[in-house]
Image (cartoon, helix red, strand yellow):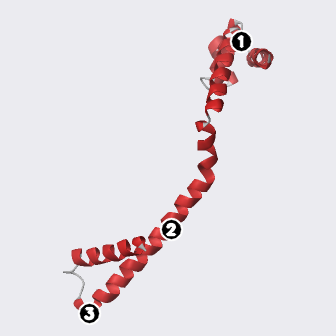
Amino acid sequence: MDQAEDLAQEAFVKLWQNCSSVPLEKAKSYIYTIANNSSLNEVAHQKVVLKYEKNFTGLDKTNENPEYLLEEKQFQAKLLKAIENLNEKQRVAFLMHRIDGKKYSEIALALNISVKAVEKRIHLALLSLRKEIDL
């Protein structure tokens, strides 16, 4: 009810703002048109809001869970420790690929090695990380 009253009031405000350009005999239809369009716009907006809430409520709940946040911090610390324990060649190739987002060919050029060597280093790094993190 409040929303309907607000839309009606806005229609009258728009009529008042445009009173010099709206003829007196068309004022009634002008108000009806403004009110109708405003209510349709409001309904469309509410649909978008509801759709957004429906799609994204699960993400916020997960991040608010303190236990989840603690586990995430512990995992991150474990991962950083595992990356530190990689040998230098594997660590450099792994970080260039996963952190810097470089392709294998770009890493091969930068390190002056073959693409196969890059693949091997990253593969060994992933195996080592999986082994250490699962412990």
Q: Mark 3 or 1 closer to N-term?
A: 3
Pointer 2: what residue?
A: 44
Q: Mark 3 near mark 1, Cβ–Cβ under 8 Å?
A: no
Q: Amino acid at mark 3?
A: Glu
Few, some or many residues within 10 Å of mark 3 (<14, 14–19, 20+): few
Against 121, is 9 above or below?
Answer: below
Neighbours of disc 1 within 10 Å: few (<14), some (14-19), many (20+) = many
Whether pointer 1 and pointer 2 mark residues with C-beta atoms closer than 8 Å, the reply is: no
Residue that numbered label 3 is attached to: 25
Q: Residue at x 68, y 14 (%)?
A: 83
Residue 123: percent from left, percent from top: 78, 19
The quarter of the picture where residue 3 lies is bottom left
Q: Quadrant of the N terminus?
A: bottom left
The local secondary structure at tag 2 comes to helix
Badge 1 marks a residue whose secondary structure is helix
Residue hosting label 1: 90
